[in-house]
């Protein structure tokens, strides 16, 4: 995929950062052909494999993929083999592992919260946010998708998302929606973030396409769903719950909404423990 190749070119900068002159330690290693195994130390959903393969191609290193993106790897399992001069294998080790560990951590966390949410609502989506690591949004959003989630907005240019500060800046929710309809492209959805039941109902009555229920309790989310149904508005809007949602409470929200968004999937996810072993 061309996007993976483009990202691999950016990974060259990560290699330059790690090896700006030459590797003092690998200088003691004989320049002979070798093979290394990349393995996971815990069960996980793999992500980042395609980008690593594209990087290996750029560097002229060989590879053999045993398990790829989206597949489950068990603890202790080798999922990718790389071949080339032993010093070069050691030089790429950390960059390759850093990418795979983070991306797989995101994919694994996404899969787990998605399974928990869909136990209550088989149609609910679990989405990421724009709370991504600078310069890593592509791989972090892709890891969410690999885990079965929805990437949500990729950037500010994708959709209108009116938040509390936008509402304050223009003088009210009604004015914010009026201006958004005038300025947004016809292809862009208009979403409004609200923090209470009354504002959620008002946003729906004013014609918002998506309503984000931010930091609301499950019982408040249930009340929004009920009142919108009573008014015949529920089928006209997408309801999204966000804020404080975890694997252990996702089902409590999933019953009443179409989307659950979880910033923690990208801003504070635990990386999967992996290693590289020379054979």
Image (cartoon, rainbow, N blue to C red):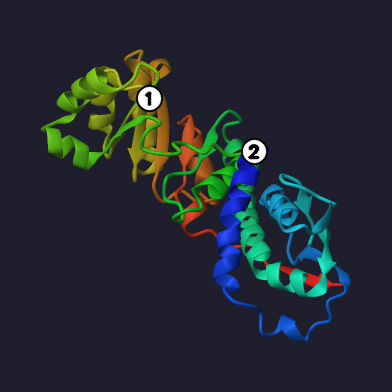
Return the residue nearer the eye: 124 or 13: 13
Per the image, label 1 sits on a secondary structure element best described as helix
- The quadrant in which the N terminus is found is top right
| In the depicted structure, whether residue 10 falls above or below residue 18 | above
Which of the 4 image quarters holds residue 158?
top left
Question: With 211 as the anchor, is 112 left or right in this view?
Answer: right
Which residue is located at x 58 percent, y 72 percent? 18
Residue 173: mark in rendering: none
Residue 236: % across, % down: 39, 16
The residue under label 1 is: 226
| Label 2 crowd (10 A; few <14 / some 14-19 / many >=20) | few
- The quadrant in which the C terminus is found is bottom right
Which residue is located at x 14 percent, y 31 percent? 172
Judged from this view, the residue extending furthest toward the left is 171
Which residue is located at x 83 percent, y 77 percent? 31
Per the image, label 2 sits on a secondary structure element best described as helix
Residue 2: mark in rendering: 2
Residue 7: % across, % down: 59, 48
The mark tally for this picture is: 2
Please identify, in this view, whether the residue under mark 1 or under mark 2 is nearer the observer. Answer: 2
């Amino acid at each position: 995929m061309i996007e993976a190749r483009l990202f691999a070119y950016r990974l060259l900068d990560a290699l330059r950062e790690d090896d700006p002159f030459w590797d003092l330690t690998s200088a003691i290693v004989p320049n002979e052909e070798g093979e290394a195994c990349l393995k996971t130390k815990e069960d996980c959903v793999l992500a980042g494999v395609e980008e690593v393969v594209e990087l290996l191609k750029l560097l002229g290193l060989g590879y053999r993929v045993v398990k790829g993106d989206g597949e489950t790897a068990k603890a202790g399992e080798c999922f990718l083999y790389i071949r080339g001069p032993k010093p070069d294998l050691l030089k790429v080790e950390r960059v390759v592992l850093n990418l795979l560990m983070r991306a797989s951590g995101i994919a694994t966390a996404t899969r787990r919260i998605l399974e928990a949410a869909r136990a209550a609502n088989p149609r609910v989506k679990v989405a990421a946010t724009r709370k991504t690591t600078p310069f890593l949004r592509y791989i972090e959003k892709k890891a969410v998708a690999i885990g079965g989630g929805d990437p949500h907005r990729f950037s500010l240019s994708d959709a209108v998302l009116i938040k509390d500060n936008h509402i304050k800046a223009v003088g009210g929710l009604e004015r914010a929606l009026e201006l958004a309809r005038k300025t947004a492209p016809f292809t862009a959805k208009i979403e409004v973030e609200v923090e209470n039941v009354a504002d959620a109902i008002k946003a729906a009555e004013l014609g918002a396409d998506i309503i984000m229920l931010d930091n609301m309790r499950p019982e408040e989310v249930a009340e929004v769903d009920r009142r919108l149904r009573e008014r015949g508005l529920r089928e006209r809007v997408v309801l999204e719950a966000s804020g404080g949602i975890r694997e252990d409470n996702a089902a409590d929200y999933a019953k009443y909404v179409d989307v659950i968004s979880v910033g923690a999937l990208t801003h504070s996810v635990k990386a999967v423990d992996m290693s590289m072993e020379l054979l």
